[in-house]
Amino acid sequence: MGKFCSSLTHYARRTTRQVSVRGHKIGGLAPVLVQTMTNTRTLDTEGSVAQIEAIARSGGKLVRLTTRDEREAQNLAPIGEGVRRHFPDVALVADVHFVPQVAAVAATTADKVRINPGNYNDRGGKFEELIELCRERGVALRIGVNHGSLAKKIFDLYGDTPEGMAASAMEFLERCRELDFHNVVVSLKSSNVRVMVYAYRLLVKAMAEAGMDYPVHLGVTEAGNLLEGRVKSAVGIGALLADGIGDTIRVSLTEAPENEIPAAQKLVAHFASRPEEHFPEVDESLFAAYEYTPRPFGTTPVLWSEVANPEEYEVVEAVSHHPVQEWRSRLVGSAPTKPVILHRRYTTANLYDFAIEAAADLGVMFIDSLADGIRIENPNFSQEEIDEIALLILQAARVRISRTEYIACPSCGRTLYDIESTLAAIKERTSHLVGLKIGVMGCIVNGPGEMADADYGYVGGLPDHISLYRGKTLVERNVPQGEAIDRLVALIKADGRWTDPN
Ligand code: SF4
């Protein structure tokens, strides 16, 4: 019977086969590889080369580019030549969503091709053709499933669920195995951190049961920016890295792509040097690893600064190098008589690094419903800063909603407006609307599908024109960008979901 993680007594990476992308190793004994994606136009050779060079200077060696049509797929060749004048070891990944023919061209110009099986209509053996092209040039393949864009037959069977995401990936992994093609990486991304964690766990379990050891690419989509984007990514990616799952990661931020690299490196470093401390074995069947179960006390998770009577709580401090396993070994299977507050001390001096560490350690404990509160200490930061991080962790785990949730795409070559400044402007108008979920998406091609369960969507329709959504329903098409935020606010007001800021 497969388990979702390779060890529940000490820290160990899941055993995977090694995939090679232009000499970069993913899986096996290789360190977790960090990667990012450009947001330039893929037909803009000079702009793309300049951005990839900036990424390479910040340490990113695997760079993905939106590849929408055959011209863009062809243009990966001159971009690669340009980049390699100064950075010979940078590998380029073609991100193909819809058209098998585009993937086939990309297999002749890129080092790796990502396909979304949900959109990959492979009638006529197109998938087999792609595999042969990849095999010929030693090109790697990523089976990249996204929550919100599952194939119809999977959707009809499972709905838009973690089970459906894992089943979609398994179908294509089986086909790779039948074709004896193993230069394959797999991902199952979602902007909903819980969905993402459950989906990867199900996939890893299914792979173990099927005798597969393909490496895994981790990411939370549309995580947003600044502290919020980093915490959301670190909760999702950290939850899996804590169990040794993950061979390459992307921290997707609505910021310049080169900013993603240090955030991803921090996350990798946090798990890379863990001394082998052993803990009593934890029975994974005793906690909810694949769906959320509420806590027995039914209370909203608290911050330590809010606690008036400490004796009403059980404070459990983790002091080892593997806090998740230490907490689990003390909490799983026990029936607490008081609500449990998790305690962890940090000394990290950089705010973003501290937030990433805390989110990677604590978030999973709330996803798995093993705790009722947070006590974080760090002498370098004020109580307000610490509380802000704790609230963001609880929001990412979806157990305490204290602010508006923004599902903002990181932007890419498809983006039709400046997302970073627009997201800031939308936040300024709406950040007091606690609990509302607003999708801010660069393009209409993938935006509506990938903003998942957002209440409202602000989506690039035409250049400098925005389409507005209520849930998944288009309500205003191609509003000039200058008017779009006002119209979004008007829509929220008309629905009776607006409150005035304090
Ligand atoms: S929503 Fe569109 S613009 Fe945004 S990252 Fe996805 S494909 Fe690119």
Image (cartoon, rainbow, N blue to C red):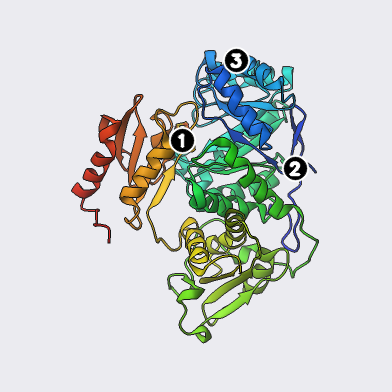
The kind of residue tagged 1 is Ser
Residue depicted at 76% across the width and 58% down the height: 274
The kind of residue tagged 2 is Thr
The kind of residue tagged 3 is Val
Q: Is mark 1 within 8 Å of ligand 1?
A: no
Q: Residues within 10 Å of mark 3 (few under 14, many from 20)?
A: many
Q: Quadrant of the C terminus?
A: bottom left
Please report contact status of discs 3 and 1: CB closer than 8 Å, yes or no: no
For this rendering, which residue is in front, 422 or 36?
A: 422
For this rendering, which residue is in front, 249 or 388?
A: 388
Q: CA distance from mark 3 to mark 1?
A: 23 Å
Residue 78 makes an appearance in the image: yes
- Sequence-wise, the earlier of marks 3 and 1 is 3
Q: Residues within 10 Å of mark 2 (few under 14, many from 20)?
A: some
State the SS at label 3.
helix
State the SS at label 1.
loop
Residue depicted at 73% across the width and 17% down the height: 136
- Residue that badge 2 annotates: 16
- Residue that badge 1 annotates: 149
Tell me which corner region of the image, top left, top right, bottom left or bottom right, holds residue 8: bottom right
- Sequence-wise, the earlier of marks 3 and 2 is 2
Q: CA distance from mark 2 to mark 1?
A: 27 Å
Tell me which corner region of the image, top left, top right, bottom left or bottom right, holds residue 87: top right
For this rendering, which residue is in front, 300 or 292?
A: 300
- Residue that badge 3 annotates: 105
